[in-house]
Amino acid sequence: MRKRARTGPRRLFGNSLRAKLTLVNVVLLALGITAATAVSIMGMKHYLLNSIDSELRSSRTAFRSMPITLDHLKKISSFRKSLIEVPPQDREAGRLPPSSSLFVAVDRYGSPVSFGYVGATRLQLQLAEAAGDAHRFATRSAPSDVRLAGDSYRAIGVRIADGTVLVIATSTEDVHASVRKALRLDLAFGVLLLALLAVLTMISASRRLRPLEDMVETASAIAEGDLKRRVPCSRTEVMETEQLRLALNSMLQQVEAAFATRERTAAQLRQFVADASHELRTPLSAIRGYLQLYDNGMLTTPEDRSRAWCRVNSETDRMNHLVEELLTLARLDQQPELRLRPVDLSRLVRDAADDLRAQDPGRPLTVRADGAILVRADEQGLRKVLANLLANVRAHTPAGTPVRLGLERRGGVVCLTVADEGPGLGEEDAARVFDRFFRAGRSAGSGLGMAIVHGVVAAHAGRVQVRTAPGKGLTVVVSLPRVPSAPAAPPDPQAPPRQPPPLEPAGRLTPGAKPAPPP
């Protein structure tokens, strides 16, 4: 079932990393501002209330320390003066001027005491009523909260010298008003700060996420076929995104190289199939032609039939040799496990020189391969390398062209050199000398000999180099790792005779196989 597309804010912000980062930052800051505001407001309120409580305790301490009585309170001049200044209408209504603090005197019988001609006000009566048992109220050590005419007060009681109890109260409305004002200011500041943070976070996230957008654009371009596209370097480098950019570019480099290798391999495979088909078509066509001549009775004389069968056998041998070389290359492509053991390369070079003298007696040959030079290799594979190199010399140089075979140590490798003084190769032909089915000019052969040489040497972890120029001959240098020689020790007359080294597990290039015919 197809999912419904998201709509509304969830669609706008639910899938955007930029919006999610902004939302998370705003929520976290809102929680922080809320917590900070709550702590500051509570601390402010607690501080202001403690200040009022301290003033009330100071007043109670002052009354306790003085031998003051109710009569003394009535005779205080300042208090009487304040009574005289009370307007008549307020006297009749029993109201005093508004003040943040007030007190009421309660006699020993629990009744509020009047001062002169002004009776107790409503607030004083409410204060006396809120205190309840005034004498017990005076024994409390801490001030108490009371409500008078809808306002909040903090009240405390004190017993004076004649036993009268004074209940003193201070309004806390200013404290609550200050707290409300501070709360409004904090909320307004918090909202502005959240809005500013949201904008800054969105801008910062856009800059920080720009490398990711570049990666998306690069991936889209590569998906459309632009394999050379890379993620550009960002101005705002962040360690994580920079590491991701480098890793992605490295991966894209490998992808491009792998794609190029695949394309090159596919092209080589197509060319290989075409060349193999062409090479096999020629002997097959010749064989079929001779067989049709024989079937149609056109070979009437024994000489014609003998010549035809010789040609059929020749083309069959050619086709068999081509198939064997193709199989050899296929085995080399599969990275065969060679039958490795210490091999005296000097002996193989001398054997190859003897074979060349037998096959081409009139060709001058110089050999430099004195002493035993050991390499760890497959003997038959190296014999095939020498046979193909010398067959290449015979096929591509005129008769009588001198050939040099050399063998020497260079550091940790052994260098085998096969050089001739033939026509040589041009730069383009030299670059393709190891390609399969490549033949310079109109030379004979299958064009697989040098490819086999390269494959066998590569299987031995060696290298093949070609130095040539038109008219200056061709030099092939094969480099193979050599077996390090140990210092000679005096023989032990009681030691048993030394056994030959064991052979390693057999691979696909086995000893005893006949070397391939020359290409």
Image (cartoon, rainbow, N blue to C red):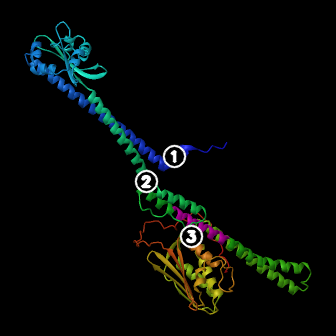
In the image, 139: left or right of 517? Answer: left
Residue 471 to residue 164: above or below: below
Q: Residue 510: image x %, image y %? A: 62, 68
**Residue beneath the point at 47% across and 57% down:** 210
Q: How packed is label 1: few (under 14 Cα within 10 Å), some, or many (20 or more)?
A: some
Q: Does the magenta stretch include residue 390?
A: no
Residue extending farthest to the left is 67
Q: What residue is pinned by disc 2?
A: 203
> Viewer-proximal residue, 288 or 101?
101
Asked where in the image residue 82 lies, by quadrant, the reply is top left
Label 3's element?
A: helix
**Residue beneath the point at 22% across and 25% down:** 100
Q: Which of marks 3 and 1 is nearer the N terminus?
A: 1
Numbered tag placed on residue 459 in the rendering: 3
**In the image, which residues are magenta?**
251-269
Residue 70 to residue 390: above or below: above
In the image, 135: left or right of 227? Answer: left
Residue extending farthest to the top is 109
Q: Check the picture and name the quadrant holding the N terminus.
A: top right
Residue 244 to residue 430: above or below: above
